[in-house]
Image (cartoon, rainbow, N blue to C red):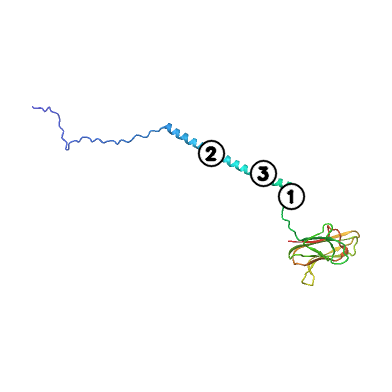
Amino acid sequence: MQQNMGYPVFWTNQPERPPVLTRIPMYPPPPFVDFKRKKRKDGTCVYLLIMFLLVLLALTGVGMGTYKIFLLQKELNHVKEFSNEASSMQSGSPEKLIGFPMEKKINRQAAHVTAKQSENLPLVWDDKTGRAFTSGIRYKERGLVINESGLHFLYSSIYFTDERCIKDRLELVHVVYKKPLRYPAFMKLMENSEFHSCRSSGMWGRHSYLGAVFNLTHNDILYVNVSDVKLVSHDETKTFFGLYKL
């Protein structure tokens, strides 16, 4: 009996192919971080920041110094002006004596006349003594004459008083009126009328005050009338008449 002692043989449909080796791509290695160089760059940034802050601080100091110098110069000029004004006090000007700059003096048209004994109407006034004065307004024949047309504030104060009671019931009348240049009649401007019950035998008094703004014309003459001239007080602080142009 013949025996087959050879090696076993295997049959395949296709011959085996040798394995294909795939080439793995080679990438460049990551960059090397130079920590010393990075540290040097960070130190440079801090240095620049410190230099910037120092320059900013220096500029701020220069600005504040300049502002202080400006204030000192301004104060020095003010002191010089004050010294010049003080050196000219001998001129006697009130504006220079108080240390303020002189202002242009404006002549205001005004008048203030005070009580004076009257025997008849209209009331007589004192335009020269005590607190009385006239400036741009004339006092003529018991009246104030308007110098310039325009708005004027007109006022009048009458103090009625007596040591006894003439009647039990007194009517006290206080009137301010004007006489226009172009019209013959008088024109009433202000009036106050009140009754006073007088039943005591001693001194009594009643006060009447009138005041308002009027458009007055050149050469208008203003007067004051009362119900009884004998009851008018002659005290200049209680009985007066005046006006001023606005």
In the rendered image, the residue lying farthest to the bottom is 184
Q: Position of residue 172 (x, y in %)?
A: 84, 64
Label 3 vs label 1: CA separation?
19 Å
Residue visible at 53% across and 38% down in the picture: 55
Label 2 vs label 1: CA separation?
50 Å
Q: Amino acid at mark 1?
A: Lys
User: Which residue was labeled with disc 1?
Assistant: 96
Q: Position of residue 68 (x, y in %)?
A: 62, 42
Q: Residues within 10 Å of mark 3 (few under 14, many from 20)?
A: few
- Residues at badges 2 and 1 in contact (C-beta under 8 Å)? no
Say if residue 209 shows up in the picture.
Answer: no
For numbered disc 1, what is the local secondary structure?
helix
In the rendered image, the residue lying farthest to the left is 1
Q: Position of residue 87 (x, y in %)?
A: 73, 46
- Residues at badges 2 and 3 in contact (C-beta under 8 Å)? no
Q: Quadrant of residue 208?
A: bottom right
Q: Quadrant of the N terminus?
A: top left
- Looking at the image, is mark 2 or mark 1 earlier in the sequence? 2
For numbered disc 3, what is the local secondary structure?
helix
**Count the marks: how many?**
3
- Looking at the image, is mark 3 or mark 1 earlier in the sequence? 3
Q: Amino acid at mark 2?
A: Val
Front disc: 2 or 3 = 3
Q: Amino acid at mark 3?
A: Leu
Q: Nearer the viewer, residue 28 or 114?
A: 114
User: Which residue was labeled with disc 3?
Assistant: 76
Q: Position of residue 2 (x, y in %)?
A: 8, 27
User: Which residue was labeled with disc 2?
Assistant: 55
Q: Residues within 10 Å of mark 1 (few under 14, many from 20)?
A: some
Q: Nearer the viewer, residue 94 or 38?
A: 94
